[in-house]
Amino acid sequence: MSQFTIPSLYKIAGRQAIVTGGGSGLGQMICQGLVANNVDVAVVDLFQDRLDETVHKCDKVKDETGSISKVTSLCYDIGDEVSNKQLVSFINENYENVDILIHCAGIRRQNPVTFSPGESLEKLQEATCSIGWKDFRDTFDVNVFGMYFLTGGLVKKLGEAAQKGDGKGCVICFSSPASVHNNQFVPAYQLSKAAIDHMVRIMAAEFADKYIRVNAVSPGLYESRMTPMAADDPTSNIKYASQLPARRAGLPEEMVALIIFMCSSGGAYLDGRNVRMDGGRLLTLKGHVYSDE
């Protein structure tokens, strides 16, 4: 029964992946995991220094594992219309195949003023309107519009990959538990993640005829620039890790294991879904809307 061995179940070596937001956090973890499994990776990020760091880490992985992956860096801003179009053109002109597209790029802008129960109506209004229009637009430009138009611009490449079978032609969009959690005063981020959830369903349906698979991942607490590990950092949610059923933050290898499954032959029957890799976080969050679809 050799078809049930790990190498047979999760064929992925030799594929070409594009990873946005690959300069840090989950994106950087995923790039290293793909390289360790002989996937060629094009790392996309807005910051060249972060790209250089990821390429360096991937080179170390190659030395440690004997991987023959090719790693390239692409410095573009997916949230900018002109830069996004330039990236699409560059990939279409310079990459023969696009088997895997992983969207990790994202930003979170919080309202600078918050409201607590019992405070005045004036304070509630101030808190609600304290986030600027630009912050709202910037969040959607990166988290939603950039993701949509980059995917759309690579449909032909993805469709050609999908025709080869074995799970090729795969898109993964990073969402968040925030997409269904009624937290307060982070509206731009939460609305953008809710939009991603539905965008994944829409794109999966629109691409169904060519079986370009589109799925989402909703990660829990993993170390990233958005979730620093320092417990005293006011921007971090890591302090909530002990409240999870898992009683800890997620490990890089756990996220990589999920991504390898979703992008490989083993995930070839998975389409239009949101995989919640969160250590059970939604089970303990109050005030969320959760559907098992």
Image: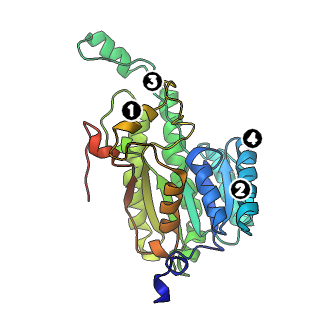
Q: Mark 2 — residue?
A: 58
Given the image, on which type of amino acid does mark 1 rest? Pro
Q: Where is residue 84 in the image (x, y as percent from the top left)?
A: 63, 50
Mark earlier in primary sequence (2, 1) = 2
Within 10 Å of disc 2 (Cα), the crowding (few <14, some 14-19, many 20+) is: many
Q: Which amino acid does label 4 sit on?
A: Asp
Q: Return the residue found at the far bottom.
A: 1
Quick one: label 1, few (<14), some, or many (20+) residues within 10 Å? some
Determine whether 288 is above or below 14 in the image. above
Q: Can you give x and y, in whole percent of width and height, for residue 43 in the image?
A: 67, 54
Q: Quadrant of the C terminus?
A: bottom left
Whether residue 211 is visible, yes or no, is: no
150 or 97: nearer the eye? 97
**Separation of marks 4 and 3 at Cα, in angstroms:** 29 Å
Q: Would you say the residues marked 4 and 3 are in contact, meaning their CB atoms lie under 8 Å apart?
A: no
Which disc, if any, is residue 49? 4
Relative vertical location of residue 157 with respect to residue 195 in this rendering, above or below: below
SS of the residue under disc 1: helix
Mark 2–mark 1 distance (CA, rounded to whole Å): 35 Å
- To which residue does mark 1 refer? 187
Marks 2 and 4, the one that precedes in the sequence = 4
- Which residue is denoted by mark 3 in the rendering? 131
Looking at marks 3 and 1 on the same chain, the residue that comes earlier in the sequence is marked by 3
Callout 4: helix, strand or loop? helix
- Circles 3 and 1 in contact, beta carbons < 8 Å: yes
Q: In the picture shown, does residue 227 fall above or below 261?
A: above
Q: Which amino acid does label 2 sit on?
A: Cys
- Against 6, residue 233 (above or below) is above
